[in-house]
Structures are given as C-alpha cells and as structure tokens.
Image (tube, rainbow, N blue to C red):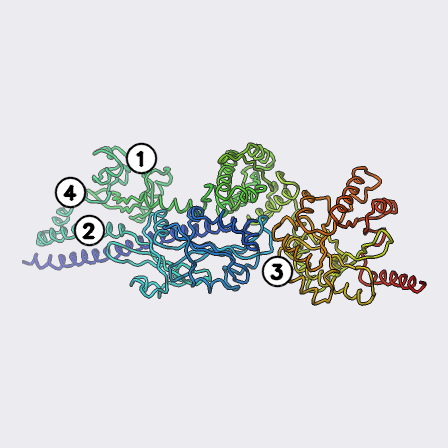
Amino acid sequence: MKSKKTLFPIGVAFTSLIGVLYATASVILFKNLHQAEERHTRQAVEGVLSAFTQSKKDLSIHIDDWASWNDTYNFVLDRNQDYIDSNLYPAGLLALKLNLVLYVQPSGKIVYGTGFDLNAQKYKSISPALKPHLVPQSPLVRHKTIESGTVGIVNLPEGLILVGAQPILSSEDKGPIRGSLIFGRYLNAGTIATLSKSTRLPLSVRAIDRADLPTDFQAMRNLLSPTNKILVRPIDKNTIAGYALLPDIYGKPAAILRVAIAREIYHQGRTSWYYLTILLAIVAIIFATIIFQLIEKLVASERKWQESEEYRHLVAKASQSIFLVNASTKQIIEANATFENFLGYHSGQLLQLTLFDLVAENQAVVERFILALQVERYFTGEQQYRRQDGILVDVEINANLITRNGKDVFCIIVHDITKRKQIEQQLQHEAFHDSLTGLANRALFMMRLEQALRLQQQQADYSFAVLFLDLDRFKAINDSLGHMLGDRLLIGIAQRLRAQIRTGDTLARLGGDEFAMVLENCSDPTEMIKRIQLALKLPFRLDGNEIFATTSIGAIANTREYRQPEDLLRDADTAMYRAKAGGKARYEVFDTSMRDRVVALFQLETDLRRAIDNQELHLHYQPIVSLVNQKIVGFEALVRWQHPQRGAISPAEFIPIAEETGLIVPIGWWVLQQACLQMQLWQAQFAMNVPFKISVNFSAPQFTQPQVGKQIIQILQATGLDAKSLQLELTESVLMEHPEAIAALMEELNALGVSLALDDFGTGYSSLSYLQRFPINILKLDRSFVCRIGKCYQSWEIVRATIMLARALDMEVVAEGIETLEQLARLRGLKCKFGQGYYFSQPVDSTAAGELLAQQFDRLVEVVSRK
C-alpha cells in the first residue's frame, strides 16, 4: 500500500508532464501549420498579382504599338472610315481580347469609340459611366510627355474593366501629342477564368464599392490598406483565402482579389496531430495499467511498446511519407508504404540506400543538414529527392532526432511540393520573360546587367559588352502589313538572334522592336555585330510576303567606367540612335562625345523653351525682288535666335530640335503673327500701288494642327493684314502628311486670297505630282540649282525646264540664292520674274528692311514728281 502511495504522485506528475507536452506540442504544431499555410497562400497571391501585372504590361504594349502609328496619328484628324474598317473589325478586336477602344482628344472629346462584346462578337455602346474619366485632368487623357501612359482599373456599373492609355504619336514616336488611345478589357468571369487557368489557382475579383459584397470581402475591405497589402484568412475548414487590393487608374483601391486554396497543409497537419493524439493516448493507457509497478518496468514497457507491431502498423499505414535513418551510418532503416510509393521503390529497396543516395544535393549540403539536425534535434526546410527512375522531386521535410532501441535515429516526414514549385517557376518565368518571343524582358535584362557589373568589379580579368538593337522601318512594316504580321516578324527575328548568342550571353526584348544583349567575356563586340547583320540579310517569308529586316545597333565595349545598369542601357541607346541617324543598318560604338552631344542637345532644347518665354527670338527679313526692275515686291520672314550666353544660334541648329520636340508649332504661330503685323505696319507707312507680300515658312506639324485655317484668319484679322498680302511657303513634307485634308485646306486659303508657294522645288521625290494635285501659286527654285548656273549644264537645264513648266501651268517662279550678276542675267534671259539672294540683300532686321523700303519709296516719289 505504501508503495502505491509513493508511486501515485509519480504517476500524477508523469501524467501532468504528458499533458503539458501534449498541449505545448499541439500549440507549436498548429502555429507552424498556420504559418506555413499563410506563407504558402501569400506566395500564391503574389504570383497572381505578378501575372495580373504582366497582363497590364501586355495590354500596354498593344496600346503602344497602335498609338505610335502614323495611321492612328492621322485618324485623330481626318477620322478616315477606312482606318476603322481595316483595323477595328470584329476579328481583330477578338484577337486582341478588347471590350473597349477609344480615341480621345486632349480636351477629352471622343474622336471615335466603341464597345465590343467578345462572346457575341458584336459592337456595343460605350458605358456612360466612363465619361467622368475622360476629362483633361484624367490619367487616361492627360499625358505630360510622349513617354507617359497608364494602365489600371475603372469601376463601371457594368463591371470592373482594365483600361490602358498611351499618347497618340507618329510612327517615329514624335509629337505633338494628338490625343490618347484607350483600350479596355472587362474583368469578367471569362477574363478571370483565363487568369485562373494560367496561374492554376481559383480566383475571384469583386468591386470594392459593391453593396452585395460577400461577407468575407466586406471584412477584408475594412482591413486591407497600403500597409496591409495582402491578408490571409481561412474561409472554412477546407479552404483558405488570400486577399489583395487592386488599384484603379488614380492609384486608389478599386477591387479586392481573392485567391482560394485548398487547406492541404492544414489537413495534413491535423492528420499528424491525430496520430500524435492516438500515440499519447496509448501511452497514457499503458501507463495507467502499470502505474503500480516499478518505474524500471514502466520504462521497459514503454520501450517494448515502441518496438511493438502496433507502433509499426501505425507508421506503416500513415498517409504521409515517413522514413527513419540511422544517425551514425546514415543508412535508411525503415520506411512506410506511402514513402516507397512516392519515390517508386519496391519493398526493401530503400533499405539498401543511405541518406546521401536519396537527397539530390551535393554531399556538403547534406552534411550541413545532418549537423543542424544533430545540434537542434529538429529541422524544417525544402530539399530535392531522387526517385527510383531518376526524376527529381521537390519536397518539404520535417525531421526530428529521436532515440530508438538506444540509438539515435532521424525520423523524417516528407511532403510533396512539386506542383507548388512548378507554379512558382511558371510565375517567375512569366514575370521575367517577354510573352511574345519568350526572350528575357527588360526586368531580367537589367538584373543580368547588374550581375555583370558586380563580376567586373570583383574580377579584374572579367569583361562584357552591351548591344542595343532597334529594327529599321519596323513601323512602316506594321503600317503596311498589319500588327499581326509584325508580331510574327518579331518572333522570327528573335529566333535568328537567339541562334547567334553564345552560352552565358543574355538576349532580351525590351519592348516594341527593341532588343538588347549582354555579351559575357567580350571586349570587342564587332564580331557579334557582323554575325547579327549576316543573319538578318536573308528575307523573312510571311504569308507570301518577302520581308527584309535590318537593324541599327549601338554598342558599349568599355564598360569599366560604369556603376549603374541604367547608365549602360542609356549610352547603348544613344549609340544606336547615332547609328540610325547615319543611314540605318549600321552600328556605332559608344564614346563620351555622344553623351556630350545628347546633353548639349537637351540643354539646347531647354534653352529654346525658355527663349520663347523670354522673347529671345526675333525676325529677319530677306527681300524678294522683281528681276525686271530690281524692285522689292516682298520679304521672306526668317526666325533668328540670340542666345544670352552663346550669341546667335544658326536656324540649322535649333529648327530641327524645335520640329522634333513640337516647339515648332508655337514658334511658327509667333513668326506668322509678327511677320503679318510688321507687313501691315510697312503698308501703312509706304503707300504702294504694286502687290507687296510677306512670305512665311509653314512647317508640317503646324499645318496639321486642328482648325489651321481658322487660326490663320484670326491672325490676319488681329493684325489688320489683307489675306492677299500673305504668302505661305510649304515643303513636300507638309503635303505628304495628309494629302486629302491638306488639299482642302489649301483650297480654303486660296479662296481667301492667301498665296501658296512650294519651297525647295526640285529637291524632293514627287514634286510634279504635287503641282497637279494641289493649288500651288508659286514655285521657289532651290538655291542648289541657281548657284550652279553657268557651271553645270544639268543645273541650267533643270532651271530652264522648271521656269517653262511654271509658265505653262500659270505659276510664278522665285529663284533663291542669287549671288552673282551672271546668275541674274541668265535668269532674266529665261524670263524668270522674281528672285532673292545675297546679290540683292542678306536677311536683315526690321529696321534695316524698313530703310530698304524707304529708299525704294523715295526713288518712286522722285520719279513721280519729275513726271
């Protein structure tokens, strides 16, 4: 009896210890289960967000291809029905998966827009709720630069729609911006199903302001925030969900994304917990039956139970893969049927292997795992196991160091995570590769550049080179053959480029028709460039079309001065543009003088913008003279720039920059207004019986502005100048932009009395067709022909033929660049009526021009008084 009283507190203490251990193990186990489950769910949500971001990038690329297209650029003005019929037909919209297409002016006015039902393949009306998002301040309409654009969600009564907008530019990616091109895709059940299929995860997206939000979405709406971007909550015992906010085009929360995942980790953990409960219950029952026996018999009984067939039966029948390893020899000493089936081994085969045979890692890695397990007595992590057929599988393991039969044994529980790894790898690939060509995208390319820079800093003998490739005339191919064929051409070019690179090199598509390369262990990239040029010499044959593609290449050979990958890409881009400017199908190796030139041009552009505001521009006037009596009959107004630091800057230097940046438009209107005002002042000062005109150069961007005729009339009315005293000089580039619209505008100006002159005649490609098609009054014979009169027979014949042609067409001719008496005499002999050049006067300011008029007026008064 005394013995029983002595053993009783021992039994109570031991039972209490088991209870505490059981409770502690349960808390730790479920805590780890919840953490693993939440981590797995968060990774799934991040993968879906990455796929959603890629969808937005794909939409942005499609918009950019269409927005930087001459046909689109022209359509905003002329609203040509052929453009709609050729590009916005149902099959095309279905291929692009678009529910919305809008062409919007900077004022927010819709030039053209349509909705499209992808299921019915029919056009539909545009949602009226979209109108508040089409105001000038909206991100969809406002574009501060030609590179700006936006992609985001808009919440409409019809549902959530993913919309993107890009500024409408010419095919050379030049302004001015004529408006905004907007594409949209509804995030409906079909779109979400496609995204769910690509990520292999069940998804749902709900608008955040819906009154009928499910209960779990309502709870998340109040909890999600910029600091809590992703939240994970169990829905029920079988499903756990991750939630994330999706922003609208203004950066504000628009919708909630839910990713629902089966709670496999949780259920597998609970199964383990049930087995643990059973084991502890058996231990407690056995202890209760022998509590009145000696402690030594109790320990012996426990050891005997561990070796019993019942213990083996529980492990053998477990649904999880479990195996035991001798801690000393690393030999596998036992494995259940689930583990054998998982790795494809027959009964007993695993017992011939060691842990080193099983884990598909090098020996050093396995030894570090064993050491951590021996020190900490437990280990949780991921490994790769080798199946019996040699296939590698990803597993998550939970390992413990236990004592069995007096020996240390590793008890390892294995969970197959191969599918999860495949999904992660797929999402990772999509995040860093171009969806069209399969090449690395800009993000991965910048990472490889950064790695190359680090290697270069660490290894003195390491070198690399960078190539930036831009296809020549790709926009023209897209415009003539269509975007679908253009995409196939890009795929073909990517395949040929991939065949040229070496192992270790990186080839990427940066976007559009731009490619880039990182050439490992390369100090001279010229050999690779020649291989690329040779590979692209053969034509591409697509749908019966034979297409030749060339590329302009910028290269950086000396990369040791760089520290940032962005600087490398910038300078390679600069070298590429130098190559393209030199005549296409060329390459240039970057040097610092190119960067200096780019910086200088940027500074000149900045100064030019300031010059307009600071009134640094002024006009000079070159007389246009009657060759019969050498009297002034008009002036050509020429803009000049007096820089406060650099002094006079040649128009040949700043006019191209003004045309490229769009500044030529405000400059052109200023020149026209000032010239008209000055001519009106001269006409008021000097009474003239002969027509006296001011000639003003009119640029292509200026002529294609909306309501050009109305603006010219307003300037004439504001300055008080008669329309018959104005002459506009146009070049062939103006006439080539929009021939139909230009012809109508020229007829309108002619009807007002404004004269139209074709400048630099004889230097273009199709001037004779323009003479027939457009209402041109005057031909300005280019100085390149006039200056060679008497020196070159061909030039003389061209001048003679031009004057005869103009006379036959009832046009006047103004010969430019007259510098000698011989040139004047020969032109008189051909009965050319008008001319200008240094022989008469160089361009002078308004004061000097007024003095020339005063002298001529005084002589006229003197002649009249004599009569």
Residue placed under numbered mark 1 in the picture: 357
Q: Of callouts 4 and 2, which one flags the residue occurring earlier in the amino acid sequence?
A: 2
Would you say 83 lies left or right of 283 here?
right
User: Label 1 to label 3, Cα distance in Å?
Assistant: 81 Å
- The earlier-in-sequence mark between 1 and 4 is 4
* Closer-to-camera residue (266/576): 576
Q: Is residue 646 visible?
A: no
Gap between marks 1 and 2, in whole Å?
30 Å
Between 378 and 478, the one nearer to me in the picture? 478
Mark 1 vs 3, N-terminal side: 1
Name the residue that disc number 4 marks. 313
Q: Earlier in the sequence, mark 3 or mark 2?
A: 2
Determine which quarter of the picture holds residue 549: top right
Near mark 2 (Cα within 10 A), the count class, few <14, some 14-19 or many ≥20, is some
User: Which residue occupies 79% across, 48% down?
Assistant: 815
Labelled pair 4, 3 in contact (Cβ < 8 Å): no
Residue 505 in the image: state x and y as whole percent: 51, 38
Label 3 sits on residue: 707
Q: As displayed, is residue 822 above or below residue 101?
A: above
Q: Nearer the viewer, mark 3 or mark 2?
A: 3
- For this rendering, which residue is in front, 680 or 550? 680
